[in-house]
Image (cartoon, rainbow, N blue to C red):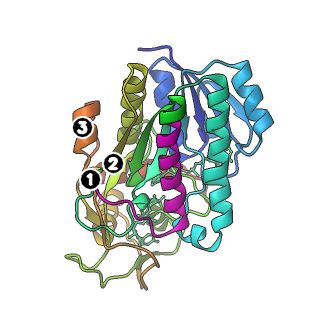
Amino acid sequence: MTNLQVLVVGGAGYIGSHMVKQLALAGCQVTTMDNLISGHRDAVLHGDFVQGDLADKVFLEHLFAQQKFDAVMHFASFIQVGESVGKPAMYYENNVTNTLNLLNAMNSAGVKNFIFSSTAATFGEPRYSPIDEQHPQVPINPYGRSKLIIEQILGDYDRAYGLKSVCLRYFNAAGADPDGQLGERHDPETHLIPLILQAASGRRPSISVFGRDYNTPDGTCIRDYIHISDLCEAHWLALLSLANGAESQQYNLGNGQGFSVQEVIDSAIRVTGRNIRVVDAPRREGDPARLVADSRLAMHKLGWTPRFAELDVMVSHAWQWEQHQPRQS
Ligand SMILES: NC(=O)c1ccc[n+]([C@@H]2O[C@H](COP(=O)([O-])OP(=O)(O)OC[C@H]3O[C@@H](n4cnc5c(N)ncnc54)[C@H](O)[C@@H]3O)[C@@H](O)[C@H]2O)c1
Ligand SMILES: O=c1ccn([C@@H]2O[C@H](COP(=O)(O)OP(=O)(O)O[C@H]3O[C@H](CO)[C@H](O)[C@H](O)[C@H]3O)[C@@H](O)[C@H]2O)c(=O)[nH]1
């Protein structure tokens, strides 16, 4: 238990809202800041909520002047790879410039601990698998580049200002709060598991499989799905490491086990017991055939162990959430 005071930026979103709950249950004083551009106010179940935008430097200055924080967790960004290709300005503005505003406000206020949501997309096309922290980072889209730029800025800010950070490079966040209180509510939804489950529940007519001609055993893309609770646990351990004086670090976070798109659909059929209409579609631009994490560094240095590594468990928690979503009449 701890009474750390933590600012969660983007805490009304999918991953941030689960984090807020976990921090509060661990005894932290949590403040969520979110502009609600894609988040949901009712997803913030604990602590204080302030509506504000990272673009607003005056707002940030006031926030840090009013409250003392031991650490900041930063989940707020635009998140769609495809959209970033057509709208790079929007992505660099929100993911880079606005993050700089946050880092500079932290610096002015003397807040020294930062946990950053980075991504597998910073690696680009895998040169080997599974992907460890030594793998070259050569992103192939503006989304991935926007996250890598921040990772690099964080190195500079540590050297110059002593800002300590942990960059967590998530692979595919999946599942939902095991208690059923929270889940994934993106609009538009682009992620595979919620889309499959919407097809199972009747909220969508079908699920499209983007390509069956990849160099994988069943021809569909392989991804490394990591349960949202395990992801939050890694953030918690990263926070404790910084609070205990650890140096800045980057960790890849996944299960180390890949599942193909077809295997995810098969899991959803097993878990839901429903028929799911599957439509074959062309490849989606920019999708590598296989993205699997080597997370051994996080396991060794943070003492992290995924608890919900089984795909059917991730899908069943997401299904529990999907069944409580409002239906259009
Ligand atoms: N979902 C994944 O599989 C995945 C994988 C790798 C990395 N990530 C990263 O994790 C983070 C969280 O992802 P998510 O799926 O929860 O996304 P999300 O869209 O559900 O949450 C992002 C939140 O940030 C808020 N926000 C965005 N811009 C803001 C701004 N300028 N000021 C204040 N609030 C702002 C949004 O309203 C939203 O609540 C993102 O940074 C994303 O890049 C996610
Ligand atoms: O309707 C769909 C949606 C997805 N897919 C496939 O399912 C797999 C997973 O796709 P997601 O969109 O769920 O996830 P991504 O692997 O594309 O994206 C994840 O990893 C990226 C980094 O590679 C980013 O970090 C992003 O935010 C994160 O969700 C991909 O092979 C995709 O082609 C389909 O076949 N049909």
Callout 1 secondary element: loop
Quarter in which the N terminus is drawn: top left
Tell me if 118 is positioned left or right of 292 in this view.
right
Q: Residue furthest right?
A: 58
- Residue 107, disc: none
- Pick the front one: 37 or 84: 84
Specify start and end residues of the magenta stretch as a single range: 134-157
Callout 3 secondary element: helix
| Labels 2 & 1 near each other (Cβ < 8 A) | yes
Res. 232 image quadrant: top left
| Labels 3 & 2 near each other (Cβ < 8 A) | no
Mark 1, Cα crowd under 10 Å, few <14 / some 14-19 / many 20+, is some
Q: Nearer the viewer, mark 1 or mark 3?
A: 1
Mark 3, Cα crowd under 10 Å, few <14 / some 14-19 / many 20+, is some
- Pick the front one: 63 or 148: 148
Q: Residue furthest front?
A: 160
- Pick the front one: 302 or 275: 302
Which residue matches tag 3? 299
Q: CA distance from mark 2 to mark 1?
A: 7 Å
Q: Amino acid at mark 1?
A: Asp
- Pick the front one: 105 or 203: 105
- Residue 132, disc: 1
Tell me if 166 is positioned left or right of 153 in this view.
left
Q: Amino acid at mark 2?
A: Asn
Residue 237 locus on image (x, y percent): 36, 29
Residue 217 locus on image (x, y percent): 19, 76
- Residue 252, disc: 2
Q: Amino acid at mark 3?
A: Met
